[in-house]
Each structure stands twice: as C-alpha cells, then as structure tokens.
Amino acid sequence: MFQTAEFAYRSMNEADTEKLAVRLTEKFQPGTVIALDGDLGAGKTRFSQAVARALGVKDVVSSPTFTIIKEYEGEQMPLYHMDVYRISMAEADELGLDDYFYGEGVSLVEWSSIVTPILPTKYLHLFLQYEGEHERIIRLTAYGEPYISWVNELKRMGV
C-alpha cells in the first residue's frame, strides 16, 4: 500500500472552495483522478464546476447524476465528470472507467466510495463535510505520488 498524506481545509464560502480547486488544478496532469465524497449538498458538484472553470471548460457543468459520465473539453486537457451514485460495482466495471482514469484527462468521481475497489491505487480523495450554510470542511487524503506532494504543499502554503 502507498503512503498517504492528509490535510483538512476549512472553506468558509464558495470562493474558498474555488481557491482550493484552482490550486489543485494547477497540478493536474493527464490521468489525474480526484475522488469526491460527502453528503448531498456538501459541494461536490460546486467543486467540480470550479475545477472545470480552472481547466478552461466553456460548457455549463452540472451533476452527471443520470448520465453517469459527462466529458468536457478543457483548454489544458479533457475533464471526465462522473457520478457513480446510482450504479453497482458490476455496472461500474462494465463502463470501462479505467479508460478514463488512465486517459488524457482529469477524472472527477462523485460518490467515489461506491467504486473504491476499481479506483487506481494512486489518487486524491476529497471528503466534503457540511458545517453550516456556507462553511465546509474539505478533508484531502492523498494516496501515492504525486498526490502526496500536492497535499503536503497545500498544507505548507495554507492553500
């Protein structure tokens, strides 16, 4: 098993969440996998929208709840936005998610805990916790490099 690194980020509003998304996006490279979890309304889709803006996606980004996967063309690289809430592990396996995880773009996986067994061994997990109307705690857990370096840098910088 890979080493991990953890960091808890307090977001007081959507601008703080956007700031975190932008800082992370600066590090992204093809094959980046960001796993997102948290209660309904915790901000998974808002975070995904901020990542899309930072990648230069011009389309409107909405939750892929019923389509499961939405592909967007960004200025730097493609964005693969997934919502696996309504699928089983068998269905997830059949979708060929590996093609996205190891592809040319960034994969954002909402409700990722449902498909943890098929996630790559190296990825960044964000758990968004509702703390109030606008406030969130975003717990970042990095599994393997380069994600560990990213999280340690965010800790040093205070984002």
Image (tube, rainbow, N blue to C red):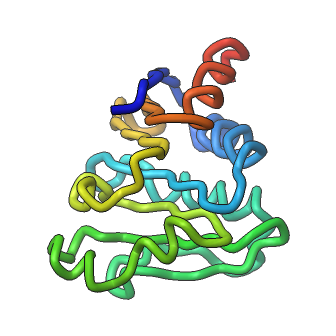
Above or below: residue 151 compared with residue 85: above
- Image quadrant for the C terminus? top right
- Which residue is nearer to you in this view: 47 or 130? 47
* Residue 35 in picture, x, y percent from top left: 42, 51
* Residue 123 in picture, x, y percent from top left: 47, 46
Above or below: residue 103 compared with residue 2: below
- Which residue is nearer to you in this view: 120 or 92? 120
Above or below: residue 84 compared with residue 70: above
Task: Give residue 109's quadrant in the image.
Answer: bottom left
Outermost residue toward the top in this view: 156
Tell me the residue at 31%/46% (across/down).
38
- Which residue is nearer to you in this view: 129 or 4? 4
Above or below: residue 81 compared with residue 157: below
Task: Give residue 74's quadrant in the image.
Answer: bottom right
Tell me the residue at 65%/68% (across/down).
105
* Residue 27 in picture, x, y percent from top left: 73, 43
Task: Give residue 119's quadrant in the image.
Answer: bottom left
Residue 125 is at least partly visible in this image: yes
* Residue 33 in picture, x, y percent from top left: 52, 55
88 lies left or right of 79:
left
Residue 135 is at least partly visible in this image: no
- Image quadrant for the N terminus? top left
Tell me the residue at 50%/66% (across/down).
101
40 lies left or right of 26:
left
Tell me the residue at 58%/82% (across/down).
71
